[in-house]
Image (cartoon, rainbow, N blue to C red):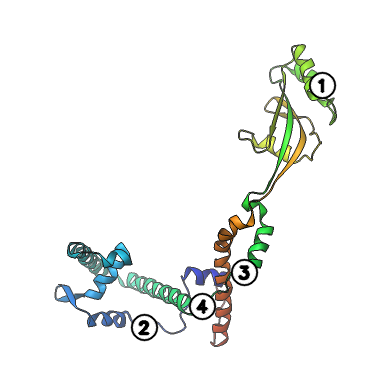
Amino acid sequence: MRLIAILLLAAGTSACQKSEPLTAIESSAQLSEVVASIDGKPVYEDELALVIKQTVGEFAALQLGTEGREKVLESLLIRKLMSDQQLNLMDEEEHKQLELELNTYREELLTKRYVREHLVAEPVSDEMVKSYYNSNPNTYGAKELRRFEMVRADVSRSPILQKELSLLMQGLTPHSNWKVKVEQARQQGQPIFLVSGHSAETGLIDDYQQIIQSLAEGEISPLHSINGILVRFRVTELIQIPAKPIEEVTKDIRKTLAPLQLKRAIQQEAEQLMRNREIERYAMD
């Protein structure tokens, strides 16, 4: 899998043949028209065309007028001046590092071109889409909500009150009428409340969410003391929300699976290439 990732990123891949000297790449530009020079060293039309394409894109490059081309040429000249100056300031070790980086980038470009021109990934089939959809329902909106009741009492300032209300709340059962019991306690002046809601509501603290998610339908939680507040929960209903229809998400699933198909194609191609070459791997410290 690491090999696949490297190939997909097209970085650090070993080329099948020895890298050509950079001068061979530069010599190909000499066939095009000279558009400028620096100390007698020519700047070619092909260089300018490539920079224009990289700067504004292929479509915009076709519509770029003389003024725009001159601006890009000026930028190209400045870049050449700065790069030449930097090259002159570097020592031997820095030159070696630069050569390494250039060779790595060259291999990256060649790998991308190889993948683009020679690999054909197997199309994502309807069965693949269906299997992925069924295996990942939550990704496409399926979820389970829990409706709950929570009895809550702030006893942080009174140990006596904490003892009284603890006994009251521990006496609640899965089938008792919590609303009636809480109302009776409130009529006696107790600071106790009943709250209803569902697990998807915003504002539920993590501690509450964890308790609610641990309960089955009709089940009640143990009594909890959280930051000086006594709480007890009962899940009253589980609600199943289905995923979006597969027809609505097929396009997204195909986009998700397409890179996986490319990975498989790269894996197969890499295995084939390795069979035809003598490759040795040495232990690394």
The quadrant of the image that shows the N terminus is bottom right
Q: Is residue 145 left or right of residue 111?
A: right
Q: Residue 247's quadrant in the figure?
A: bottom right
Q: On the image, numbered disc 4 is attached to which residue? A: 119
- The answer to which of 92 and 68 lies nearer the viewer is 68
Q: CA distance from mark 1 to mark 3?
A: 60 Å
Query: Which amino acid does the dot numbered 2 rest on?
Result: Glu
Q: Nearer the viewer, mark 2 or mark 1?
A: 1
Q: Is residue 49 left or right of residue 106?
A: left
Q: Earlier in the sequence, mark 4 or mark 3?
A: 4
Q: On the image, numbered disc 2 is attached to which residue? A: 20
The quadrant of the image that shows the C terminus is bottom right
Q: On the image, numbered disc 3 is attached to which residue? A: 125
Query: Which amino acid does the dot numbered 1 rest on?
Result: Leu
Question: Quick check: 104 above or below 149?
Answer: below
Rendering coords of residue 40 (x, y %): 14, 76
Query: Which amino acid does the dot numbered 4 rest on?
Result: Leu
- The answer to which of 157 and 239 lies nearer the viewer is 239
Q: On the image, numbered disc 1 is attached to which residue? A: 168
Asked if residue 163 shows in the view, the reply is no
